Image: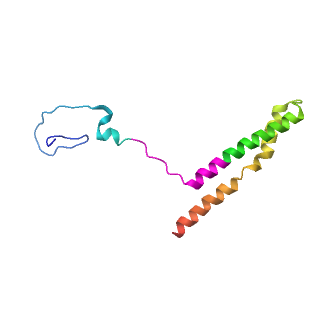
Amino acid sequence: MENTLWANTVLASPGYILGTIVHTGLETRMAMNISKPRQKVGALDLEVNWMAKVLFVVMCLVALAIIIADGFVGEWYFKYFRLILLLCAIIPISMRINLDLGKIWYSYCI
C-alpha cells in the first residue's frame, strides 16, 4: 500500500514510472464517492405535497361525479376539463407561497 498511487494523483519527481493499473470495478473509493447527493426535504414540505396530491385526486373525482350525474351528455370531456378549471381553487397554491416566504423570512432573521 505504501507504493500505491490513487486516481488523479500527480507525480512530482522527474523521471519515469513503471506501474500496473488495477481496476476493481465499483468497489473503489472513487467509484463509491460518485453517488448522487440526497435531497433534503422538510417534513412540512412533504406533508404539503401529500395534501396537494390528495386534493388533486379529490378534485378530479368530484368533477367526474358531476359528469356522471349529468349523464355524459354532449361533449362531456370538454365539460370535465371545464369543471377541473372551476374546481382548481380546492388546491391552495397561496399556502405553498406563504410557507416559502415564511421560510425565507425566518432564514433571514436567523
- Image spot of residue 84 (x, y percent): 78, 41
Which quadrant would the N terminus be assigned to in this image? top left
Report the side of 80 relative to 108 (left or right). right
Foreground residue among 81 and 43: 43
Residue, far left: 15
Residue at 17 percent of width and 40 percent of height: 4
Q: Is residue 110 left or right of residue 81?
A: left
- Image-based side of 71 in relation to 55, left or right: right
Splitting the image into 4 quarters, where does residue 78 fall?
top right
Q: Which residues are magenta?
A: 35-51
- Residue 13 in the image: above or below residue 97: above
Let me know if residue 2 is in the magenta part. no
Q: What residue is at 20 percent from the left and 44 percent from the top?
A: 10
Residue 71, position as x, y percentages in the image: 89, 31
In front: 96, or 10? Answer: 96
Q: Residue at x 29, y 37 (%)?
A: 28
Whole-percent x and y of residue 40?
A: 50, 51
Q: How many numbered callouts?
A: 0
Residue 44 belongs to the span the image colors magenta: yes
Q: Residue furthest bottom?
A: 109
Rendering coords of residue 99 (x, y %): 63, 59
Please give the name of the residue rendered at 69% of the width and 56% of the height, measured from the top-left corner.
Answer: 94
Q: Is residue 6 above or below residue 92?
A: above
Asked which colour scheme the image uses, the reply is rainbow
